[in-house]
Every structure is written in structure tokens, then in C-alpha cells.
Amino acid sequence: MTARTETCYINANLTLYDASNSPLTVYAVNLTLPRKDDEIIECRLTFKTDFKVYQHIDIKALFNLESDARISGNSCKFQKSLPIQIEVSLKPDLLPHLQKHATSANEAAAYLLNQCQLMNPDQSELVKTEKLSDKPKLSNFLLATESWLVLSVRQSQKSGEVGYRTIWSYSSSLGTSVMDSSHDGLIESVTALFQDLGINDLPLGNIAKEIAVESISQFADLLKITGEDSSILSSEELNDLLQSTESDEQDINDFPNSQSILGLVTNFLKDNNFNFSPIMDLDILQLSAQGKNGRYNCFAQAIEEKQQLIFYSVCLAQVPLDKRRAIAEFITRANYGLIIGNFEMDWSDGQIRYKTSIDVEGGTLTTEMVKQLVYVNVLTIDSYLPGLVAIAQQNLDAQEAIALVESEL
């Protein structure tokens, strides 16, 4: 078989859309198509953006940029004044759709740009159809941010290049074994991955590989695309929580101060082997938590001047509009019986999250307090998740869903 790679230099703005159909415009640099004979085996898109847009991508985990998908490097040395380059790869099961419309890198780039233009009708046409307030319906999955996987995030500085890679950047070595979740295939692929990372001689040996296989098997689910109506829960937002600031970039070695609230939380997460990352310029740590019933994006926010700590666990998707009244009743019924923390739903986008918080002004925050704040939070949202799913997928009413959950508590 003949292998070759085609590259098309785009150098134009490209607008993609998140799970709520909100637009995200980036500057597309190039599109690359590795091929074997006449078959497209991958589609890679490289684009540049400014620090503010990158921070938006990072916080909302767009392009499947989950915190535990990052496996090397760090993002704590990015400078606000310089562009950030991001390379993404199209999910494998969308490649046949792309190949229906393009047989070369030039055609693929032209197709994406053309679809982008179709999603932006002129203002006069919108007035005629009286849909000015409506968001455009996303009819092409190639324009969805969740259809792409971040491979790397980099920034060129005077001192050199900084950034990080993700598990998706090793897709070539993981190969089709990730797609079918074959255990033996994953063992072989993980071995190759460990060799690439230079950790193949660790004494953990097969035990470490088995753990990696379990983690990568979870990632495999993200490689599969489902229909737009197949799931009620999809991506998370924290627009009301996160605010931009103008402070200088921070070094991971001095962030946060060990005597601060966030420093105590950082030490707790390290001691308990959590993978986490700081969100630059914000007193927030981001991490993922896996429960019995699902996985959640979590955020620990410190408000140092008020001596307050807030911990959020966010469902990895949004509730559709037609289910929000039932979900609102469900979380109201749930909150009435809860002692520590509460559920919240953003009515504008359907985000569901659980919040626990503590105010220690005049007192001292302890590791045990942080432990309770974190574990009670994750255990509670995980316990109630089956009720949320039952309302969305089985059409149970709120009272039936609460009874279902509380029968298991």
C-alpha cells in the first residue's frame, strides 16, 4: 500500500459550532490528509487563535480537550500577547462522510469553508424568515467542535516552544484497537505508547499497562459519533463562573501559594492522585472525576479575599429545552432533601452541575474539610445522575425519577 500525505494551506477564518450551536471562529492555517492508496485515513486541521479564545476552548473542553486527556507538557507558560496554535483530528468514523465530498486536501478544505458559509446566511434572508433570534441548525457534523480531537496545543515564544500533547496525538500508534476496544490490541498499542513516552522500562510493567488500557477504553467512546437526538447530556459550560482578568502569566511552580486556599486544595488533589490543571489567571483548578454512573468535569474555585471555596461537578452535557421543566422539578425535589450542597441548572443552555461550598473567614480550612467538599459533591451528583437520565431517555416524570434514585440511596 502506498502512503502519502497531502496538505492544503487555508489561511482563512473558519467558524465551527459547539454543542449548543454557539459559533467559534478560528484562523485555519492548513488541512492535512494522510492517505493509504485512495483511502483517507486521517484528517488534521491546524488553526491559530488568541489566548482568550483558547481559554474558552480549555474551560468548555471543546474539541474533546478534557483535562485527563493531556499527557505531556503544560499550558501554564502561555503568554497572552502571542497566538496559540492548535492541531485537531477529525473523529475516525466521520472520515467516510468527508470522503464522499472530497478526494484531496484542497477539496476537503474547500468543502469545510463552503459549509461554513452556508451556516451564515445574510441578514436580509434571516429577516424574511423571521428567525433572527434562532441559532443556525447544525446540519453538518464536520462543523461541530465535538467531532474533532485536540492533538496538541503550542505557542512559539522567544525562549522556545511551549505547550502540551494529548492522548489523541498517539492515535497512529493506538490504531484501530482503540476503535474496537480490543483488549489485546490495546495492550500492544499501549506498549508502543509507553515506548514513545520513554517509560517502557518502569517496574510497574503490565500493571501500569492494564491501568492505561482501562483509561484508553473510556476514551474510545469519544471516537464514535451519534445522531443529534440520541443523547441529552453532551458538553459543559461555566460562563457564569469564569471571568477574565489582566494579570501576568503564572508559572506552575509558584501557582498557587501553598498557604492559600487554592494551595491547600492543590496539595489535597496531589496527595490523592487526582489529575488536574490550573486555569490561567483564575483561582480555579480543573479536573475530571469518574463515578459509578458517569464522568464529570470538576472545578475548584477559591475566592481568597472572602476565604471561600466552591467545588462544582458538571454533567458532561446539556439538557434539551423540552426536558428542562421536568429536570427543574427533579432538582428542586432533590435539593429539598439534601443537607450538603445543591443542584443547579442554567436555564439558558441546560447545564446541570452540583455545588458544594464553604466559608472559612475567621477560621482555618483543613484537608478534611476539602475532602468532604470534594467527595460529597461527586458522590451526590453520581447518585442522582440515573434520575436525570431516566427523565431524558425513559420519559419518567420528576416524582418517579426521584423515587427511582432514592430507592437506591
Image (spheres, rainbow, N blue to C red):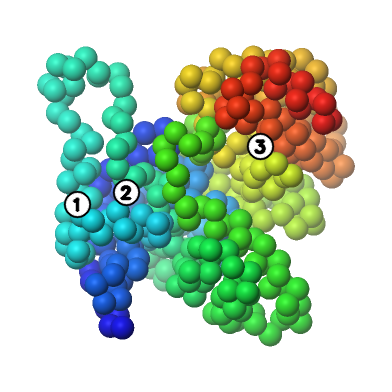
Q: Residue at x 68, y 73 (%)?
A: 209
What's the amino acid at mark 2?
A: Leu
Residue that mark 1 sits on? 111
What's the amino acid at mark 3?
A: Ser
Q: Quadrant of the N terminus?
A: bottom left
Up/down of 315 relative to 100, above or below: above
For label 1, count other residues whose C-alpha is less than 10 Å away and answer few (under 14), some (14-19) or many (20+). Answer: some
Q: Are marks 1 and 2 in contact (CB under 8 Å)?
A: yes
Of the pair 281 and 275, the residue shown nearer to us: 275
Q: Are marks 2 and 3 in contact (CB under 8 Å)?
A: no
Q: Is residue 120 among what the camera can see? A: yes
For label 3, count other residues whose C-alpha is less than 10 Å away and answer few (under 14), some (14-19) or many (20+). Answer: many
Disc 2 secondary structure class: helix
- Distance from disc 2 to disc 3, alpha carbons, whole Å, reads 29 Å
Q: Give x and y (percent) for residue 24.
A: 34, 41
Of the pair 395 and 32, the residue shown nearer to us: 395
Q: Residue furthest front?
A: 394
Of the pair 239 and 150, the residue shown nearer to us: 150
For label 2, count other residues whose C-alpha is less than 10 Å away and answer few (under 14), some (14-19) or many (20+). Answer: many
Q: Is residue 76 among what the camera can see? A: no
Disc 3 secondary structure class: strand
Q: Quadrant of the C terminus?
A: top right
Q: Is residue 144 left or right of residue 331?
A: left
Q: Quadrant of residue 314?
A: top right
Frontmost of labels 3 and 1 is 1
Residue that mark 2 sits on? 142
